[in-house]
Image (spheres, rainbow, N blue to C red):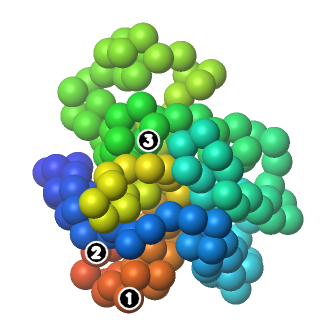
Amino acid sequence: MALNEDLEKIASQERELHLPRLDAHVAWDLGTRIRTLATERGLSLVIDVRRFGQPLFYSALEGTTADNAEWVRRKSNVVARFHRSSYAVGMTLKLKGTTLLERYGLPVADYAADGGSFPLIVENAGIVGSVTVSGLPQHDDHNLVVEALCALLGRDFAALRLGPESA
């Protein structure tokens, strides 16, 4: 099943894409990498890089709305709560035939288990924040974040990216 394959790939991404540290400089570098990819491709995105409780980078590109900012907040809340990619949480719930509200009592006004938020994992410290985008289909939001992390860390994106989205 494609969902299981994607979940395995995301688990691999989460094991391998670790930062040596997360500070304002790293957040700026990661955020501007995503922004550059988006502008070069003509994408409309909101981009957020944060330590939990502290925004470090934020950019809203032309064509985005307040809804994109809300999606970023809600997806980032999922990473903060579950310490997993928002896409992985959403796919796991889909496999189980349930929702965040049904399973955990989490309101849709504050949590979105849709792709685009990825945990920022610091070596020897663990998950300390998230990088989140909103503006594309959730599969593409997720892949864009992974692409930028791969570029930042000198990793092979082709080996870590999710394949084409399945139905």
* Foreground residue among 12 and 115: 12
What is the count of numbered marks?
A: 3
Q: Residue 55 carries which label?
A: none
Residue 136 figure quarter:
bottom right
Question: Which residue in the protein does label 1 denote?
Answer: 154
Q: Residues within 10 Å of mark 2 (few under 14, many from 20)?
A: some
From what the image shows, is residue 66 above or below residue 112?
below
Residue name at image x 81 percent, y 42 percent: 66
Q: Is residue 166 visible?
A: no
Q: Distance between the residues labelled 1 and 3?
A: 24 Å
Q: Residue at x 47, y 82 (%)?
A: 152
Precedes in sequence: disc 2 or disc 3:
3
**Between discs 1 and 3, the one toward the N terminus:** 3
Q: Residue 79 carries which label?
A: 3
Q: Distance between the residues labelled 2 and 1?
A: 12 Å
Amino acid identity at mark 1: Gly
Secondary structure at numbered mark 2? helix
15 with respect to 70 (left or right): left
User: What is the secondary structure assignment of the residue under circle 3?
Assistant: helix
Which residue has dot 2 on it?
160
Residue 162 position in % (x across, y down): 32, 67
Quadrant position of residue 6: bottom left
Image height check: is 109 above or below 132? above
The first of marks 2 and 1 along the sequence is: 1
Q: In which quarter of the image is residue 166?
A: bottom left
* Horizontal relation, residue 147 to residue 5: left or right: right
Identified by mark 3, the residue type is Val
